[in-house]
Image (cartoon, rainbow, N blue to C red):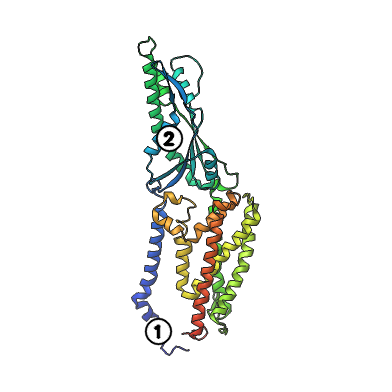
Amino acid sequence: MPDSRSPRSVTDVLRAPRFWLAPIVVVSALMSLLAALYLGGILNPRESLNSYPIVLVNQDLGDVVESDGETQEQNFGNDIAEGLVAGIDADQIDLKQTGPAEAQQLLASGEAYGSIVIPSDFTKRALILARASVVAGDVDKPIITVNTNPRAGAFSVSLTQQIAETALSEVNSTVGSELTAQVESQLEGSDTVLSGASRLALAQPIDIITTAYDPLPDGTGGGLSAFYYALLLVLAGFTGATIVNALVDGLLGFTPTEFGPRVIYRGATRISRTGTLAVKWAIMLVVAAIVSALYLSISTSLGMPSPNSLGLYLYSAFAITAVGVTALSVMSVFGTAGLLINLIVFIVLALPSSGGTVPLEASPGIYSWLAQFEPMHQILLGTRAILYFHGRPDAGLLQAVTMTGVGLLIGLALGLVFTRVYDRKGLDRATAE
C-alpha cells in the first residue's frame, strides 16, 4: 500500500531529537554492556572462585616411629589432607578426595582442573629427612605432585598452580615445624646440636613438583584452539545468517541491493513469510556443510591436530546450522531489531560466559547462569571434547550435542510459529507498509 503522507524534508528529519538519540543511546548501551561483561569476567578470577574442582589423592602408607621407647604410627599424608580440607574455603574450592583411578577419570574427562597427589612413601621420606638432619648421608625431600589439566582450559593451568601453591605453602611450614620438634625432642640430653642448615631444610621439607596431566600437543595454541574454533562456528552461524538474510531479501525484492553507487530495486516476489524463511534455512544448511569442511581443511593445513576429523566436521556443521537457523528465525520474527537481538545473544553475552578463556568456576555467578543456555558454551564443550578429550561423551560432547539440538528445535519452532501467524493475518511483506 503506497504511503499517502508527504515526504519529509532533510531538515525536518535532522531536527528530530530521536534521529540523533536512537543510534547514540543504542550503541552506548550495547558497548557499556560489552565492557562490563568482558572486563568483569577476567579482572579478579581468584576473588570469583566458586566450587573450583580440584582432586586430592592421598596414597601415603605412613610409617612407624619411636618415641620415649615406644613405637607409634605416623602418617603425615593424613595430616596434610586434613589440613588442606580445613584450610581451604569449601565455597571457593571443591576439593574432592579420591583414589588415583577416579582422579585420572576426572582429569581425563575435564571435570577437574587439577590434582594434588601425596605419594605412598611420603611419611617414610619425611622421617628419613628428619634423621638425616643429624646423621650424615644423602637424602631426598618428600614429594607432593600438583597435576594441572591444560586440556580443561589454558587459564586454569596457572590458576590451579596458584591455588595449590598457596595451600601447600602453609602445609609445608606445618610439616616442617612438626619434624623440627620431633628432632629436637630426640636430641634432648645429647651433645648433638641441630645445625642451621638442617633447620633450614626441616623448615620447608616438602618438594612440590608441578606437572601437566596429559599435555596438549603442538598446534593447539596452548589450549586455546578449542575456544577459537568454537568462536568460528558461532560466527559462521551468526554472520552467515545475517548475510543470507540480507542477500535473499534483496534478491526477492524486499530490500534494495546496493553495489557501490548503484542501487537495484527489484519488484517484491509473491512469496509468504514462511516460504521465505524456509528458503533461507535451506541455504544456511548448505552453507554450514561447506563452511564446516573449509574450517577443517584450513585448520589442519595450519597444523592443528584433529584426532577425530569426521566427528569435528559433523558437529561443526550441526552447530553452524543450529545457530544460523535460530538467527534467521529471530530476524524473521523481529525484523531489523532481530539483528541487535542476535548480536547480544550470540556474541555479547556468549563470549564471556563460554568458559573458554576463564573457567566459569572462576567467574562471577551470572556467567555460570548464562552458560546454561548460551550457545557458545555448549559449542565449546563439543569442540573441546572432540579436539582434546578423544570425543568422550562425559567430557561435554553429550551435553553439547543435546543442547545444540534443543537450540535448533527452538529456532525452528520460533520461526515456523510466528511466520505462519504473520501469514494468516495477511501481513504480506510485499504489501506491508
Question: Which numbered mark, 1 or 2, is in the foreground of this view?
Answer: 2
Task: Report helix, strand or loop for mark 2.
Answer: helix
N-terminal of the pair, mark 1 or mark 2, is 1
Image disc number at residue 350 = none
Q: What residue type is labelled 2?
A: Ala
Q: Is residue 238 visible?
A: no
Against 385, residue 238 (above or below) is: below
Residue 362, given in percent of the width and then of the height, sits at 42, 49
What x and y, as percent, mark residue 180?
38, 21
Using a 10 Å C-alpha cutoff, classify the residue at mark 2 as few (fewer than 14 neighbours), some (14 to 19) or many (20 or more). some
Residue toward you, 191 or 160: 191
Secondary structure under badge 1?
loop
Question: Residue sitting at 57 percent across and 83 percent down?
Answer: 271
Depth check, front residue: 151 or 352: 151
Q: Is residue 257 above or below residue 348?
A: below
Q: Mark 2 points at which residue?
A: 81
For the residues labelled 1 and 2, say whether their Cβ atoms are less than 8 Å apart. no
Q: Is residue 300 left or right of residue 206?
A: right
Q: Residue at x 48, y 46 (%)?
A: 155
Q: In this view, does 340 lie to the left or right of 12?
A: right
Distance from disc 1 to disc 2, alpha carbons, whole Å, reads 77 Å
Label 1: which residue? 8
Amino acid tagged 1: Arg
Residue 227 in view (yes/no): yes
Q: Residue furthest top?
A: 191
Estimate the x, y position of residue 431 in percent, counting from the top left: 50, 86
The one of 37 and 369 positioned closer to us in this rendering: 369
Residue 344: x %, y % from top left: 45, 64
In this view, 22 is above or below 48: below
Instruction: Count residues near mark 1 (Cα–Cα under 10 Å), then give few for <14, some for 14-19, many for 20+.
Output: few
